[in-house]
Image (cartoon, helix red, strand yellow):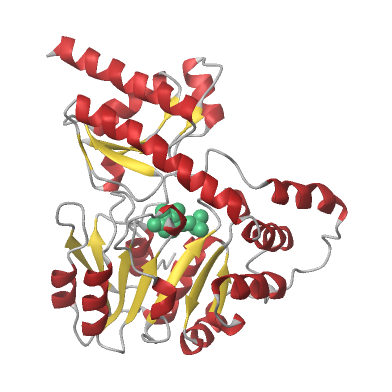
């Protein structure tokens, strides 16, 4: 078959292990998944109500491809025009739409490294050159990212807070960067963890959209809103960017239930701020653990933490798995001696912290 050259060596996304898989493997009763930065508190009660009421909807019609209700709710909530929004089957799909619209052989795209894997994956699929600029102390190296831009650069990706480090770009650094990026290069600012951020010197991305017509901000209902399985993400940008991207989007990319739960979820900001506050409190327990055991970590503005165990990340991963905790080995994330742990509920965190302690004790005996 005549596969595109660029996909021959491309690997399919490796999802974290499923709960059922691990239960069987280790004969455990209870498994906690702290691997994909989902919300451990589930989703809003308001959403639950909609789901209960809506079980009898007709599903035989195609959904509203323009997601009109969700669009209007989101526009009101964000303080932008409905025409400044694009909705997608998770942010993942939006990242793909953006890449399809701009990347092709002969063009290049600039991103940090390590960062969210999909930027690179999509770029390879489109046959574009990928320019990865190493993080410095866990942070985007914006100066070197600027230096990497040239006339063939079509997209520059910023992930803030960055997955997997949890670090963020400060307001001053972002302003300086935006001012210097040529106007014909699209800047994608991925804010999947926006709602968790509480740093004082974080920027207000939406206020920048009018000033920078080459900026698109992406957010998601998968993380703090606790709706990952519904797959809804969205982008906020100038009308020019949105109208250029719209034709690349599949006509019915968000389904009828997903649109409904997402617009309901927006109305419960109380739930969102409660989850953010709990996350912040629980994150402190991981900092304490790391400090006590001299493990390097990054201060995180997300709902996850990257911890360096100074040994093969897969070994830590496998040990925690045997105790019933699914985390993410840093091996696949560009940090081979680390693991990334999603901040869970208080009980889950006590459990995974105990399991990490047990791992360290085992290591100490071995050495
Ligand atoms: C989880 C995540 C996404 C993808 O979110 P979906 O809306 O579920 O596709 C995008 N970017 C980053 C940085 C993420 O961590």
At x 54% / y 45%, what residue is drawn? 274
Q: Is residue 47 depicted above or below 112 in this figure? A: above
**Quadrant position of residue 316:** top left
**Seen from this angle, which residue lies furthest front?**
200
Residue 266 position, x and y percent, is 62, 60
Would residue 5 be visible to someone looking at this image?
A: no
Which one is nearer the viewer's eye here, 140 or 44?
44
Q: Quadrant of the C terminus?
A: top left
Image position of 319 with respect to 197: above or below: above
Residue 201: x and y in percent read: 29, 63
* Point 48% across, 90% down: residue: 240
On the image, the x and y values in percent for residue 148 come to: 16, 75
**Frontmost residue, 108 versus 172:** 172
Q: Is residue 43 above or below residue 219?
A: above
The image shows residue 164 at horizontal and vertical percentages of 31, 49
Q: How many marks?
A: 0
Image quadrant in which the N terminus is located: bottom left
Residue 170: which quarter of the image? bottom left
Position above or below: 112 against 67: above
Residue 263 sits in quarter = bottom right
At a point 31% along the width and 67% down the height, the residue shown is 158
Q: Residue furthest top?
A: 365
Q: Is residue 211 visible?
A: yes
Residue nearest the observer in this picture, 9 or 22 = 22
Question: Could you tell whether 351 is left or right of 310 in the image?
Answer: right
Residue 257 or 118: which is nearer the viewer?
257
In the visual, does 208 lie left or right of 93?
Answer: left
Quadrant position of ligand 1: bottom left
């Amino acid at each position: 078959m005549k596969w595109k050259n660029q996909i021959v060596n491309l690997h399919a996304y490796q999802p974290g292990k499923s709960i059922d898989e691990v239960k069987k493997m280790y004969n455990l009763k209870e498994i906690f998944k702290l691997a994909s930065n989902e919300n451990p508190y589930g989703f809003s009660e308001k959403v639950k109500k909609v789901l209960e009421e809506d079980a009898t909807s007709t599903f035989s019609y195609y959904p509203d491809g323009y997601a009109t209700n969700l669009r209007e709710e989101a526009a009101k909530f964000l303080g932008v025009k409905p025409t400044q929004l694009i909705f997608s089957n998770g942010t993942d799909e939006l990242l793909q739409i953006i890449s399809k619209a701009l990347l092709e052989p002969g063009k290049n795209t600039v991103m940090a490294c390590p960062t969210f894997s999909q930027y690179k994956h999509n770029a390879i699929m489109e046959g574009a050159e990928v320019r990865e600029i190493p993080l410095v102390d866990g942070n985007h190296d914006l100066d070197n990212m600027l230096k990497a831009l040239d006339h063939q650069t079509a997209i520059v990706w910023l992930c803030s807070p960055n997955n997997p480090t949890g670090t963020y770009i400060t307001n001053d650094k972002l302003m300086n960067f935006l001012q210097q990026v040529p106007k014909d290069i699209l800047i994608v600012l991925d804010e999947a963890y926006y709602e968790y951020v509480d740093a004082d010197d974080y920027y207000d991305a939406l206020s920048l959209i009018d000033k920078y017509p080459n900026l698109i901000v992406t957010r998601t209902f998968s993380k703090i809103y606790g709706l990952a399985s519904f797959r809804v993400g969205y982008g906020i940008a100038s009308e020019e960017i949105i109208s250029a991207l719209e034709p690349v989007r599949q006509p019915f990319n968000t389904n009828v239930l997903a649109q409904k739960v997402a617009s309901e979820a927006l109305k419960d900001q109380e739930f969102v701020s409660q989850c953010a506050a709990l996350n912040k409190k629980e994150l402190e327990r991981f900092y304490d653990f790391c400090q006590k055991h001299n493990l390097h970590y990054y201060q995180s503005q997300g709902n996850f933490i990257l911890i360096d165990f100074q040994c093969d990340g897969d070994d830590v991963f496998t040990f925690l798995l045997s105790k019933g905790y699914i985390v993410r080995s840093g091996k696949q994330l560009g940090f081979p001696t680390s693991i990334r742990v999603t901040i869970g509920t208080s009980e889950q965190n006590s459990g995974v912290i105990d399991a990490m302690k047990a791992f360290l004790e085992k290591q100490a005996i071995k050495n």
